[in-house]
Image (cartoon, rainbow, N blue to C red):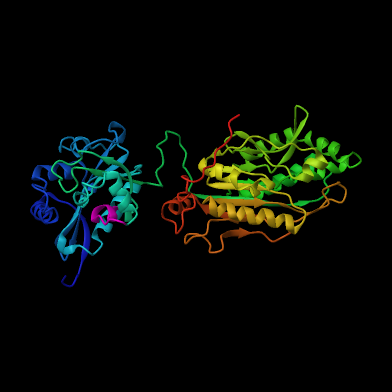
């Protein structure tokens, strides 16, 4: 190859036809009549000019990519090339479609080895993202299959290519560009004798795709978290507790945070007036405030335009005592969550029962999960939430010693890595000398991330000063999780060996 002075990617023009035809004859030397007619190119350019691009090197035609947009629901996964192109009329193209369908990609033999195919595929991906399409689909040839046709089925051939036992120049290249085989297509391309007219349906998912909505709302990518590291101190009454809570809500909302996270049992100081009672009676005394606290938090979430995770509080239901919390959304919605695993001390001293409800919550900032303290030490719970699409896991906690805190902290960071999500933990500090079973607290609130190139090297986005009353603010990028899931150095969710193990909920 002579010296390269210039490589450019440009839109295909009808005037490029002669060069395109010659390039196709070179690229598809083993296929008969393997070139488009002038009317085909004129139609593609007229219908969808952005989908037709050419790479030129030193002003010489080097390669080309042709695409259309289709409403994929109108086709099944057994379609042929003729069907998807509307018998080569491209009447199947519609600007209202949801899938970018690859019609052709080729590079002239003299320019191969320069990774020009990768440039063409990268352009398609960028176009797909810009047009907010669900993904890219096309039928990929398997030109070396004819060598193995008497010994292997198409599926067996594809499996061996995936395991690198067989080299297929087309399929290997497409899989290396993040396209995954979805299905074998029989009779896909007439005259493709090398592939025995089989093709592999290849797909690439646009992780940035957002379903169109008629609501006047913007789905946020950058989400700001506000964590409240709450100081345990004696308060005169509920009014004083909520006055302090509103102070923190006001502070984090002033920084335009999307969430405010309070700790587990942040309202425990109210038990001081019941300290003459037994521990089980004192915690039940505290439970009488829960409904009013939730109501006040809901009003704060609306007036301060912020989603509030209330930490947790005791709640009596049919004379059974639970550790629960509420998500108060800024749109007025209120949802409840429960602590699934109570600690031995909570069961023995207070008589708390473990809850039975585990779910993710839809918010204006994506799907979130909430686990209370001890629950984060059970990896199955957060994995189930991750399977439901959780982006951020919030963990309100209460620990008295550094040992207890370390269990919560280290398990929370593990959850961020293994579930490819952000994890925010918030706890209380200080002491309550006049409340039995709540003598001391230790906490360092933190925001954890996965560990990969797009994130902090130690997996810590932000951390509060230990054992000091303060707020912690951190921005997290939800889109970075989508990239991690598809292109991360390791892919903890996608690489699970579900052929060996699986996790599922018990039905009740």
Q: Residue at x 71, y 42 (%)?
A: 312
The question of residue 49 being in magenta is answered with no
Q: Residue at x 11, y 46 (%)?
A: 36
Q: Quadrant of residue 73?
A: top left
Q: Residue at x 9, y 45 (%)?
A: 37
Please name the predominant secondary structure of the magenta segment in the image. helix
Q: List x then y, in percent, for residue 368.
A: 56, 43
Q: In the figure, 198 relative to 105: above or below?
A: above
Q: Nearer the viewer, residue 230 or 160?
A: 160
Q: Quadrant of the N terminus?
A: bottom left
Is 103 left, or right, of 227 in this rendering?
Answer: left
Question: Can see residue 365?
Answer: no
First to last magenta residue range? 165-174
Q: List x then y, in percent, for residue 342.
A: 72, 42
Question: Can see residue 460?
Answer: yes
Q: Nearer the viewer, residue 243 or 69?
A: 69
Is 9 left, or right, of 482 in this rendering?
Answer: left
Q: Nearer the viewer, residue 488 or 163?
A: 163
């Amino acid at each position: 190859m002579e010296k390269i002075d210039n490589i450019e990617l440009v839109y295909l023009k009808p005037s490029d036809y002669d060069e395109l035809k010659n390039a196709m004859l070179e690229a598809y030397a083993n296929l008969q009549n393997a070139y488009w007619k002038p009317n085909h190119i004129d139609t593609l350019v007229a219908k969808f000019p952005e989908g037709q691009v050419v790479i030129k090197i030193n002003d010489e035609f080097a390669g080309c990519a042709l695409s259309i947009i289709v409403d994929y629901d109108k086709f099944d996964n057994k379609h042929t090339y003729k069907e998807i192109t509307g018998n080569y009329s491209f009447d199947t193209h519609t600007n209202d479609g949801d899938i970018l369908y690859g019609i052709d990609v080729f590079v002239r033999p003299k320019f191969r080895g320069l990774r020009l195919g990768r440039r063409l595929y990268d352009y398609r991906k960028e176009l797909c993202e810009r047009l907010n399409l669900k993904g890219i689909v096309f039928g990929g040839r398997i030109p070396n299959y004819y060598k193995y046709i008497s010994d292997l089925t198409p599926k067996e051939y594809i499996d061996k290519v995936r395991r690198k036992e067989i080299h297929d120049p087309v399929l290997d290249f497409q899989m290396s560009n993040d396209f995954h085989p979805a299905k074998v297509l029989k009779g896909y391309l007439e005259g493709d004798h090398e592939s025995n007219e089989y093709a592999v349906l290849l797909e690439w998912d646009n992780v940035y795709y957002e379903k169109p909505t008629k609501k006047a709302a913007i789905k946020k990518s950058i989400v700001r978290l506000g964590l409240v590291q709450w100081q345990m101190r004696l308060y005169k009454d509920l009014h004083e507790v909520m006055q302090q809570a509103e102070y923190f809500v006001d502070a984090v909302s002033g920084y335009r945070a999307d969430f405010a996270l309070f700790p587990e049992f942040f309202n425990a100081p109210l038990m001081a007036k019941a300290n003459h009672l037994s521990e089980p009676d004192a915690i039940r005394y505290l439970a009488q405030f829960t409904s009013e606290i939730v109501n006040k938090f809901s009003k704060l979430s609306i007036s301060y335009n912020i989603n509030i995770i209330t930490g947790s509080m005791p709640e009596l239901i049919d004379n059974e005592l639970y550790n629960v919390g509420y998500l108060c959304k800024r749109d007025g919605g209120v949802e409840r969550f429960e602590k699934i695993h109570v600690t031995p001390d909570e069961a023995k001293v207070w008589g708390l029962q473990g809850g039975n409800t585990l779910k993710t919550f839809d918010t204006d900032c994506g799907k979130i999960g909430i686990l209370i303290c001890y629950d984060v030490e059970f990896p199955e719970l957060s994995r189930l939430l991750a399977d439901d699409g959780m982006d951020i896991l919030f963990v309100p906690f209460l620990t008295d010693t550094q040992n207890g805190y370390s269990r919560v902290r280290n398990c929370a960071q593990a959850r961020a890595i293994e579930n490819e999500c952000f994890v925010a933990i918030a706890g209380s500090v200080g002491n309550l000398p006049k409340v039995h079973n709540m003598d001391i607290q230790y906490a360092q609130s933190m925001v954890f991330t996965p560990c990969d190139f797009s994130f902090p090297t130690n997996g810590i986005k932000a951390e509060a000063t230990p054992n000091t009353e303060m707020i912690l603010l951190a921005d997290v990028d939800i889109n970075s999780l989508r990239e991690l899931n598809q292109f991360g150095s390791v892919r903890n969710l996608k690489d699970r060996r579900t052929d060996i193990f699986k996790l599922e909920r018990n039905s009740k």
